[in-house]
Amino acid sequence: RSGAVIVDFYSDSCGPCRQIAPAYKALAKEYASKAVFVKVDVNRQHQISGRYGVRSMPTFLFFVGGKKYKEFSGAGEQQLRQFTKMSVDKADRENVELTFESMMEFYAVNDPMKAEEDVEAVLKRCAGQAKAG
């Protein structure tokens, strides 16, 4: 799956981490079908937190399609919500499956004169760009 992943780097001894934990849990429930939520205990996972340069807690990393998209540190619930929504929306936009049938439906509405062969050619170009990117 190449959707959104939201990672919470936290520590049990961190006050702001405990403060934002309920909001993170609520977002994980709200976006359960759209994103993966992962909590990383920096005291137990030194290597992972070191790899991502985590120096303060909580730190949130947002990945889309396996690449880091956003990051912030602190217990900002509004920022957490905003970056989660942005990440999920970006993942939704980038993970569109083009099929011949969906393209034919699109062109039936937007360009009814487009021939099936032309739709097929467009689909092949799109598939070629997706593989190259």
Image: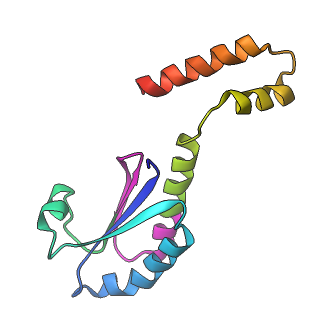
From the viewer's perspective, is residue 115 above or below residue 94?
above
Q: Is residue 114 left or right of residue 129?
A: right
> Is residue 56 a member of the stretch shown in magenta?
no
Q: How many marks?
A: 0
**Residue shown at 54%/67% (left/top)?**
31
Image height of 54 relative to 133, above or below? below
For residue 133, what is the image quadrant? top left
Camera-side residue: 11 or 3?
A: 3
Q: Position of residue 109 (x, y in %)?
A: 86, 30
**Nearest the eye: 125 or 64:** 125
Q: Is residue 92 above or below residue 57?
A: above
Task: State yes or no: residue 78 in magenta.
Answer: yes
Relative to 7, is 114 on the left or the right? right
Residue at position x 56%, y 72% in the image: 30
Judge from the rendering whether residue 128 lies leftward or rightward of residue 63; answer left or right.
Answer: right
Instruction: Name the residue located 80 percent from the left edge and 15 percent from the top edge.
Output: 114
The part of the chain drawn in magenta is: 61-82
Percent across and percent down for residue 125 are 57, 17
**Which percent across, then down, holds residue 101?**
72, 30
Rendered image coloring scheme:
rainbow
